[in-house]
Image (tube, rainbow, N blue to C red):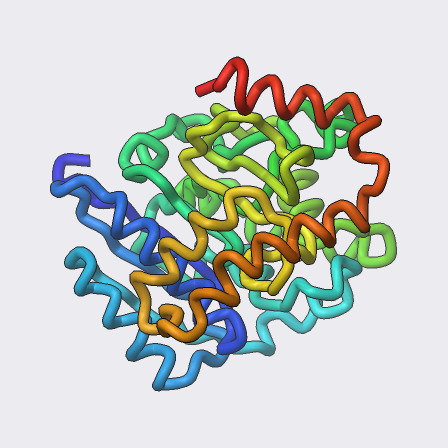
Amino acid sequence: MMDNRINVCVSCDDNYAKYAGVVIASVLANADNDDNLYFYILNGGISEENKEKIASLKSIKNCEINFVSIDEKMFEDYKNVKTHQYISIATYYRLKAPTLLPDVDKLIYLDCDMVVNTSLKELFNKDTSNYLLAGVSDNKTRMVKENPTYVNAGMLVMDLNNMRKDGTEEKFFNYTKENINKITKGDQEIINDVCKGRINVIEPEWNVQTSNFVNRSNYTNFPKIIHYLSKEKPWKFGSYSYFKPLWFKYLQLTPWALKENEKLKWGFLNQVVSILLYVKHRPLFLFRPRFYKALFYTYVLKNK
């Protein structure tokens, strides 16, 4: 890209506007000086107040922020897809990205439970010339054994131009209608089954999927993108999400930053409670081989 343009897409309703703001703040904070960032927010009802807060993030680094209005009627057929209760219909908006963003040929899609720790230039330039998508293998190894190009859908490099040529958007719709009672993993299952074999599987540090110290898709100490999986989101008090302090670091760059009288609760006390809750959740963690594997890679090998 001669102008170093990088298109980034997030999708949310008003409840997740704050978390989308943290994602955007992390991208801007780690951008190179010549990164020309364009954000497209698939807007599922964000309030004017929260739109203003998100727009204020331009103070971190100048960029373009576009709110794309969504007609909920376009997604009626996706509302009955079985998935986790904490996942909203907004996650399905990206399935119609080729239509919603007609002037965009390629973008990086990021879920709202992520943070970025590096410039996205290298990621945006990943090869998609003969692919529909690029992504990182999912942490569910069983799914990857069944489908070698099965990726976690929290981060996707989407070649919208190739998707338009392929008719992928219509294929998503038809697949959903035909398999509505069989789908158990929501939009991720739809994306992987429809795009099977046409996904460029890239390095794991571009989507380090983590729910706690032990359960991480990759034990690197230098994740380029962190994806906070499961219900244990970092914004939940007592969450035992690993890399949680990084999320709060980027939160502090936003209009939702913690006030001085909140920092003790969400800092030291939060960490203590998270350890106690993890021990309660996993009382036999000392007997898990993966615990010692995590220790070795994190503190001995210090895998990059």
Q: Which residue occupies the foreground of this view, 45 or 181?
A: 45
User: In screen coordinates, is 297 left or right of 180?
Assistant: left
Question: Residue, x 61% and y 40% (percent of image)?
Answer: 210
Q: Which residue occupies the foreground of this view, 124 or 227?
A: 227
Instruction: Classify 39 as above or below 224.
Output: below
Q: Residue furthest bottom?
A: 48
Question: Residue, x 27% and y 65% (percent of image)?
Answer: 65
Instruction: Classify 135 as above or below 272.
Output: above
User: In screen coordinates, is 239 left or right of 247?
Assistant: right
Which quadrant of the figure has residue 49? bottom left
- The C terminus: image quadrant: top left
Q: Residue furthest top?
A: 301
Tell me residue 104's x, y (percent): 32, 52
Q: Which residue occupies the foreground of this view, 192 or 300?
A: 300
- The N terminus: image quadrant: top left
Question: Residue, x 47% and y 28% (percent of image)?
Answer: 221
